[in-house]
Amino acid sequence: MTTFASTPQKTAASAAALKEAATELLPLLKDNAARTEADRRVAEENIEALADAGLFRLTVPKRFGGHEAGFRTFLEVSSELARGCGSTAWVTTLVNVCNWMVALYPERAQQEVWGENPDARVCGVLAPSATSRAVEGGLVVTGRWGFASGSLHSQWATVGIPVVDASGQQTDQGAALIPMSDLTIEDTWYVAGMRGTGSNTLVADEVFVPEHRILSVTRGVQGDYPTEHKDESLYRSALVPVLALVLAGPQVGLAQAGMDMVTTSLAKGKGISYTFYDRAADAPSTQIQLADAAQLIDTARLHLMRAADDIDTWAARGEYMPFETRARVRMDTGYVARRSREALGLLLSIQGAGSFAEANPLQRIWRDQETGSRHAVINPAIAGELYGRALLGIEEQVTPLI
């Protein structure tokens, strides 16, 4: 029988305390946002502040001193952080969702990640862009995984791999948990938005991964996780709805950041050029556009939180989320991104061409949202297609990730 070392317990914070901690960090994140973008990595001061506030441990089990917070809390925190810095919120999101994935692995793997370092952070890429070779006790993996957000600040990575048998035949799709010390990072993240996420390429060259650190994605999509801790409801949450929905949290926060900036500008008496309006706030067109933007943000937030509550509720019941509901969460994710983009578009129109001055943070917010909201898992068109098929009872789907 294998025994594991005990881990000192920390006190899990309440949902309100975690959101308040995120709010308290906003001045720091705003001050460092331009530097984060210029350096193409989240400012280390931000990382340290997030770690000190416990915001990288949202989804770490309480057994390891984490908060084991539900996904409503997760999304409230990530959207709040995005009001300060989109890149910082994105990295915090990806680290937390990858930490959640680690808690789906067997206890032995969890101990290797957090047993000696409860603050260990994990990044990840699910796409199986690798080759595998079966050896005694596991697989030898070689591959490259692009867009590994948070990799510059993580100690571990979970990466997609083909699972093969001794003959080399693929038998499954897996997620391999690998220490960053076994990987190299190739500097490839040169983009228009979300520049500070450092979403570079991970590279593995003949890395051995033991069996207990390989999670079956195929079984995971159906809610079959190898963790021995079946009483922990957070780790019964539906895999794909979680992986998709968390990406929408920063979208709402970025739209709200735009709203914050534009309403502040209007309050200072900004006018409308080439009109008789000395104060844009006095113009009915401004008032209507602002109201429409606020309504779009509210609509996005309502869909975001409904989907989060669905994930949390089904997990608490101990029942795996039904197929149609999982498909709707994918639809909600794309809908949140689309509505958030529309809201920010209206806010840019209110602010005018000056929004795109390099000195204006609004253009960075816009670029971050335009980039982050086009993550492949968010894709609103694909989400609509798969949800429509689910509503019509069409068995053939466009993706297994539902």
Image: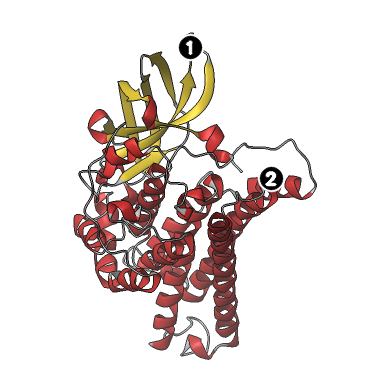
Q: Quadrant of residue 53?
A: bottom left
Q: Residue at x 46, y 90 (%)?
A: 278
Residue 166, compared with residue 231, is above or below; it is above
Task: State which quarter of the image contains the C terminus.
Answer: top right
Asked if residue 129 lies left or right of residue 304, the reply is: left
- Where is 75 relative to 119, above or below? below
In front of the other: 333 or 338: 333
Query: Mark 1 is on which residue type?
Result: Gly
What x and y, as percent, mark residue 110?
Answer: 33, 41
Label annotation for residue 168: 1
Q: Residue furthest right?
A: 392
What residue sits right under mark 2 in the picture?
386
Closer-to-camera residue (332/272): 332
Q: Amino acid at mark 2?
A: Leu
Q: Is residue 393 above or below residue 353?
A: above
As rendered, which of 160 and 58 lies closer to the eye? 58
